[in-house]
Image (spheres, rainbow, N blue to C red):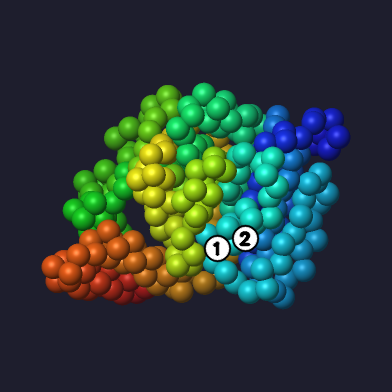
């Protein structure tokens, strides 16, 4: 671990994360920030668990913000982002159970600064077993979204899930444009994030990142995937003990996103079909 004073903080970069009984996970994140070639000027930890007292390692610029209730992921990130000063131009939005490789933030910033219309820039996300998580995906269309929702857990190689996950391009080493990036770790341009109002608070958990990528694109920004920057995601730290509730929340958020995308009055029968299909999938996965 480097001496915290050995590397000057980058005045334009901050980290914002959300904790829900995530003290152990946060220790690993902070250790990786200590070792990073780019030292963030500020690190905001939003504590969504009122009964949890966070005792964290020292890190220059670290601040814990008490949410006084479980706001959800996107709303928690928004709260943390509002605490940042005007000198912050880039925000690394990350889960507490992410570990950055030494050059990850540096690699993200290099691409971000070279592409002035980049609104969000995401790294390659490695899972504990060494697999690459499909963190850069196409925005779900009706066909892709419904096909993935219905068959993802019963037909793993179905074409809708493959397209949704972007697996047909996952082996490329070059950065590329994508529909949206995983909210577990992405660097967002402060100007773009603020211009669209940050995350939509109505998504308690899941699909807030899909919605963010969609709104960035509509506002003229690009979402870029940078596999040269890699992070380790140890996985769903705060949701493991609430798996059934989180599956239900995932399906609620999926319906919220798709129902807004297909919001015309004449599409009411379609929205009903979506509700039934997602309800059926929720029932199947809860039994599994």
Q: Is residue 40 left or right of residue 201?
A: right
Q: Which residue is mark 1?
A: 75
Res 239 → quadrant:
bottom right
Rendering coords of residue 3 (x, y %): 85, 35
Instruction: Give the camera-side residue of 78 and 171.
Output: 78
Q: Nearer the viewer, residue 230 or 127?
A: 230
Q: Quadrant of the C terminus?
A: bottom left
Report x, y in % for residue 208: 44, 58
Q: Is residue 206 above or below residue 104?
A: below
Q: CA distance from mark 1 to mark 2?
A: 6 Å
Answer with left or right where residue 91 lies relative to residue 166.
Answer: right
Residue name at image x 46 percent, y 51 percent: 196
Tell me if label 1 and label 2 are in contact, CB under 8 Å: yes
Direction from residue 90 to residue 226 in the image, left or right: left
Residue 284 in sight: no
Q: Is residue 137 left or right of residue 229?
A: left
Residue position for label 2:
79
Name the residue rendered at 19%, 65% in the picture. 264
Q: Position of residue 180 (x, y in %)?
A: 39, 45
């Amino acid at each position: 671990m480097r001496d915290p004073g050995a590397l000057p903080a980058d005045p334009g970069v901050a980290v914002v994360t959300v904790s829900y009984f995530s003290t152990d996970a946060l220790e690993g994140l902070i250790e990786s920030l200590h070792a990073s070639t780019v030292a963030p000027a500020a690190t905001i930890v939003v504590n969504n668990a009122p009964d949890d007292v966070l005792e964290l390692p020292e890190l220059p610029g670290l601040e814990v913000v008490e949410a006084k209730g479980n706001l959800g992921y996107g709303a928690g990130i928004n709260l943390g982002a509002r605490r940042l000063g005007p000198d912050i131009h880039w925000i690394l939005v990350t889960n507490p159970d992410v570990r950055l490789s030494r050059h990850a933030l540096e690699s993200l910033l290099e691409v971000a600064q070279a592409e002035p219309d980049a609104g969000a820039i995401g790294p390659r996300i490695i899972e504990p077993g060494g697999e690459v998580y499909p963190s850069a995906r196409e925005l779900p269309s009706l066909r892709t979204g419904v096909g993935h929702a219905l068959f993802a857990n019963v037909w793993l190689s179905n074409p809708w899930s493959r397209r949704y996950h972007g697996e047909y391009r996952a082996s490329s080493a070059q950065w590329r444009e994508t529909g949206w990036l995983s909210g577990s770790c992405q660097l967002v341009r402060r100007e773009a994030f603020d211009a669209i109002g940050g995350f939509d608070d109505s998504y308690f958990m899941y699909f807030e990142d899909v919605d963010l990528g969609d709104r960035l694109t509509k506002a003229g920004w690009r979402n870029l995937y940078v596999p040269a920057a890699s992070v380790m995601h140890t996985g769903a730290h705060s949701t493991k003990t609430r798996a059934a509730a989180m599956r239900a929340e995932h399906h609620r958020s999926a319906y919220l996103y798709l129902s807004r995308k297909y919001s015309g009055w004449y599409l009411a029968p379609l929205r009903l079909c979506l509700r039934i299909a997602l309800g059926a999938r929720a029932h199947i996965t809860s039994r599994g």
